[in-house]
Amino acid sequence: MDSVPLDKANNYSKEIIETRHRFIEEKTGVKLQHVNQYSFDPDTTKGNIENFIGVAQIPIGLAGPLQVNGEYAQGEFLIPLATAEGTLVASYNRGMRLINMCGGALTTISGNSMQRAPVFIFKNSRVARDFSHWVKEHYQEIKAACNSTTKIGRLIRIEQYLSNKFVFLRFNYTTGDAAGQNMVSKATFVGVQYILENFKDIDRFYMESNLATDKKASMINILSTRGKRVTAEVTIPGNLLQERMRTSVESLHYHFGIASVGGFVSGVNNNGLHAANGLTAMFIATGQDVANISESSTGIIYCEENPKDHLYISITLPSLIVASYGGGTGLATQRECQDILGCYGQDGVMKLAEIMAAAVLAGEISLAAAISSLDWIWSHERMGRNR
């Protein structure tokens, strides 16, 4: 069987890329006309992709401006959304207009951490318990070993979970403007080496126990934070809901209660409507690791009806994993979208997290109103797949 053409000396050169194009045509009969069209130097994708052949062109739409009243994001922002789903940009744009009419979304970041979770196996549970005490007593030494690997990442705590004869250690770090999964893996590896050299009664260990829950939604991330824990909130007057969304405070509040019951019955781990929609579109546009949408899209909605016919609504994203530097954020089109948001580079990640949370809130409000007013299906008929 023929393998994909590879040039170990320069696997991003024009010649080897064209060789791969011919390989595709010979093996499949497909002559590339679009995948092979791109506007940047393929050499810039080193570390992001192997066996480069071209690009997947996903339409980018623009929503906003969106008023964000955050601690890091302050002002109006244009929101690039990369998606192939009709009505998505229009729906988010509708929610953003309503939020702007209410003075903007208040955003707050209340948590920040990235994890790696090795597991240690012992002869019996008593040795495991003794190891747990030892880790607490030697935390500062373990921390120094972890922090020695990076100028940016910092170990902030080690959570412990004991079961049977196992000790699961969940190392928590701050990671600057990077998402940080690779950073914390290296740091934890060095910390584990210190542990192995200084505690002799460990039978076996694994660098990851699945307790970090990489790219999986989980209750531990909802409770303890993975990435950024960020909340966006707004209070909407009832007359604006009637005028702009053709629904009422009472109807939306009532629907929130019913939807929460529906979520409980179905066994979902959050009560949001569709945070994955807006976040995925922003992830693709800004160069995030899209697989992180599995935990990032967990959305906890709360709303209340106040006596003055106003609706307070907020969403908390407890595990929003984003970066303003590193990974795919520096690729050509992704960098441009980061620049549109004014977030690329140092000190941009908190701002980006706040903007994304505010955008998600806009999408939640818009879809909830569309369901309440029965606009939802007809919007897709007019603008979406069935057009």
Image (cartoon, rainbow, N blue to C red):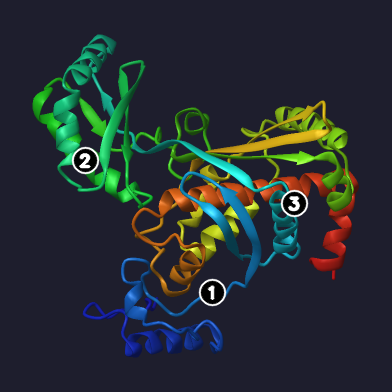
Q: In the image shown, does 46 or 273 lie closer to the viewer?
A: 273
Q: Where is residue 170 in the image (x, y as percent from the top left)?
A: 34, 30
Q: In the image shown, does 352 or 97 lie closer to the viewer?
A: 97
Crowd class of label 2 (few under 14; some 14 to 19; many from 20; radius 10 Å): some
Using the image, determine if residue 262 lies above or below residue 326. Answer: above
The type of residue carrying mark 3 is: Leu
Residue depicted at x 80% and y 40%? 237
Q: Where is mark 1, residue-wise?
A: 56
Residue depicted at x 67% and y 39%? 272
Q: In this view, does 123 lie to the left or right of 172?
A: left
Q: Position of residue 195 (x, y in %)?
A: 16, 28
Q: Where is mark 2, residue-wise?
A: 189
Q: Where is residue 212 in the image (x, y as percent from the top left)?
A: 40, 36
State which tag comes first along the sequence, 1 or 3. 1
Q: Where is mark 3, residue-wise?
A: 98
Q: In this view, does 343 lie to the left or right of 85?
A: left
Residue depicted at x 32% and y 80%? 12
